[in-house]
Amino acid sequence: MTSHAIVSYAAYLPRHRVLRDELGTALGIRAGRGERAAASFDEDSTTMGVEAARRLLPARTAPGALYFATTSPAYLDKTNAAAVHAALGLPSDAFVADLAGSARSGIAALRAAWLGGGLAVLSDVRTGRPGSADERDGGDGAAAFAFGAPDEAIAEIVAHASATAEFLDRWRAPGSPVGDQWEERFGLETYLPLIEDAGQRALKAAGLAQPDHVLLVSPNSAVRKRAVKLFPARLSVGGSPLGHTGAADPGLALADLLDRAGAGETILLLSAADGCDAVLLRTTDRLPDARQPEPVAGQLAAGRPVSYPAYLTWRGWLDREPPRRPEPDRPAGPPSARGERWKFGFTGSRCENCGFVHLPPARVCKECGAVDAMTAAPLAGVRGTVATYTVDRLAHSPSPPLIDAVVDFDGGGRCTLEIADAAAGELAVGARVEPVFRRLHTAGGVHNYFWKARMTADTREEGSTT
Amino acid sequence: MSSNGIRDRVAVVGMGCTPFGEHWERSADDLLLDATQECLAATPNLSPDDVDAYWLGTLGSGQSGMALSRPLSLDHKPVTRVENYCATGSEAFRNACYAVASGAYDRVMAVGVEKLKDSGFSGLLRSDPPGDGTAPELSLTAPAAFSLLDPAYCARYGVDPGAMREAMTHVAWKNHANGARNPKAQFRSVVSKETIERAPLVAGRLGVFDCSGVSDGAACALIVRAEDAPQYTDRPMYVKGLSLVAGPARGAMDPGYDYTTFPEVVHAAADAYRQAGVTDPRTQISLAEVHDCFTPTEVVLMEDLGFADRGQSWRDVLDGAFELGGRLPVNPDGGLKSFGHPVGASGLRMLYECWLQFRGEAGERQLAEPRLGLTHNLGGRPGGCVSFVSVVGPDLG
């Protein structure tokens, strides 16, 4: 069996946090302390997957495959991985596929990528009824892994083993936003021998008595609490850093550990979902120099509160009065396909004659009039400065008011973009922003994916100190 | 830009204009009939079928020439429907004038109509062709797009935001005060500056009173060769210059554009002034009807039209230069702000005020001996728009 190694990893955590004490007060329940990472109204599993994958180190060769895992697919029947592929600007000869539906899809994407090479993108928005454990203890986020040649490895797959069983622990009917759970202890008792079995076989295959680190993730919270007692580890035992995140769970747990683990350390990753998958990894001495720029812990700490009523509105539990404006039209298929590189890849055109940058791309230069003398100007990774902005209280938005800014990009190019993750009072002329992939709205069952601008971390910090 | 112009070759010899407002009881068909009947009633012995050709301007209240020929039951007439955003009414007028000037027709009529209040929504509706969903104007509303002028103007000229707010308030206050003297205006009350500034915010610093009225209405003009004009009226209104510019929409892509001007307006004004022989608009223009869709628009337009120096119009506004009794009355009929803005009719409504002023029929708003009038109509938004400018007058030469 040929096995590919992890050569790069990255996680994306949405910026918003639901405060559990606010949730508890609103509903009159005990919801505990702390906070829950919440995807914004304009984020879904696809957009978060894009943001995680964009943070991967530039690949030596373009990945030939992309596996996208989620329990909250934005579309059925249509491959969500294709939107991720388009947003990343990957070559058209790549194979991409969704592994969608259950928590085990996360491991499936990793496994497909380590066996065949390519990208595994794990992303999820976990929604529960107001007051439920899924709402309180779940989390939204994404993680991406690039698998490649051993000489680039930051972590190798040393061994793996799986166990499977059919039993009713967590389930959800198609179309329902929320899932169900049998008595938790039934799941726990069923999982324990499966975890033991898969874990021991992986360790045995690797000839290892005790790993340096153990990670255990599961949709069953009782299993998660039992992690410490199941497999002793030399250095650390942990799990998902932000509660259960569905198919993203094993990815976020692993990314968080790779932020901290040393070189040459072994990691036993146990994912208990309708059985158990055990993956034994060993980090390499390349890891310390190839960690993701924004560690999971740092992203977790950089959250900002969203009010519980706003969160309920975003998830559709609170049906609030919209502005007296028509709903937007659904994006049309052929124009979206023609504009794929613009709409999904944020690629404009640069005049070969005079250098003027056009967003969206144009065939006739606005500066010099040259016709069809353009080269692609990909700006998704380019920062810009807010030239001017406005707060639109009349516009139709899933979360009014809408904030739009005129952004001038470094090196040329101007575009009017919606501002993501900002409150009305935070923005200023001169603020530094970066493009982020978002879902503008959904109309007629079609998601309108496009780019917004978000204040860069350094701009946000400047703002908070003044 | 080269345009030969048709100075003094055609004349308006009759006009009609319905009251603008929320006409729940009247359809676009009714409004078209009311406006054209009013116009023809003032020119005895003329029936709709005596008009050789029609131009109908409407943004969205009908399609094709039949939107006019059907309600008027015209007898197989050439009717052209035009659309050019909020400059639609002016565009109908421009094309009708050129048809007469060309000699193709003796008598034509430009008609504009809009029925906005049947939609149930606030503001204007868009009807865009199917697209990829990325155009900012799909989400950003018109008040938001024009609100960008305010902070940009303050930043460019170092104007204190409080002073700019006062100038914007003054524009709304003035246009409401003018509209209060106009029996056909949608809003006919004087509004206090305090009320204007305390209104709920719509976008940026623009409140409800910084926005033009959303209304229903129709207006029309009967146009003939200048030499034929005396057959119809002893007080015709002559067309001195007509200019229309569609911008390349460069500002929205150009970091060099700073949202303190409409280049399209500057171009259209220069062209119209040249055609009309206007060399000093501040002294030669007696009144101007401009596209005050939002209050900061009027502030910026004063500079683009050459009525004020760059960076100074806010001061001139506050000094009362553009009030009824000021050095250059702007929007004496109340403007879009209080007369209302039924899109396809607005450009013709502006000409209607010039028509009344030249004839001495403007009632409480009457200016003393106006010699040249300017109308300015704009469609689109800062960064990319169409702009129309006309110069008209009561005298030949």
Image (spheres, rainbow, N blue to C red):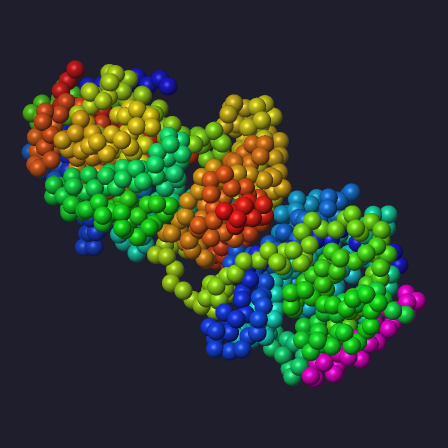
Does A193 appear above or below B47? below
Q: Nearer the viewer, residue A210 or A364?
A: A210
Asked if residue B17 shows in the view, the reply is: no
* Residue A100 in picture, x, y percent from top left: 66, 64
- Characterize the magenta stretch by its predominant secondary structure: helix
Pick the front one: A435 or B47: A435
Q: How many numbered badges does the structure rendering display?
A: 0
Residue A224 makes an appearance in the image? yes
The image shows residue A402 at horizontal and vertical percentages of: 44, 51
The vertical placement of B386 against A307, above or below, is above
Return the x and y of residue A337 as percentages of the image width and height.
58, 46
Query: What residue is at 61 percent from the left and 26 percent from the top?
Result: A352
Name the residue at 8% across, 30% down: B360
Q: Is residue B313 magenta?
A: no
Image quarter of the N terminus of chain A = bottom right
Is A236 left or right of A359, judged from the image as shown?
Answer: right
Lateral position of residue B235 relative to residue B248, left or right: left
Where is residue B188? Give x, y as percent. 15, 46
Q: Which residue, as the protein is rendered here, is positioned at the far front?
A: A466
| Residue stretch rendered in magenta on the structure | A185-208
In the displayed structure, B388 sits above or below A78; it is above
Question: Is A378 or A23 nearer to us in this picture?
Answer: A23
Q: Residue at x 63, y 59 (%)?
A: A300
Q: Quadrant of residue B243?
A: top left
The answer to whether residue A201 is magenta is: yes
Looking at the image, residue B328 sits to the left or right of residue A168; the answer is left
What residue appears at the point 61 percent right and 69 percent down from the top-left corner? A138
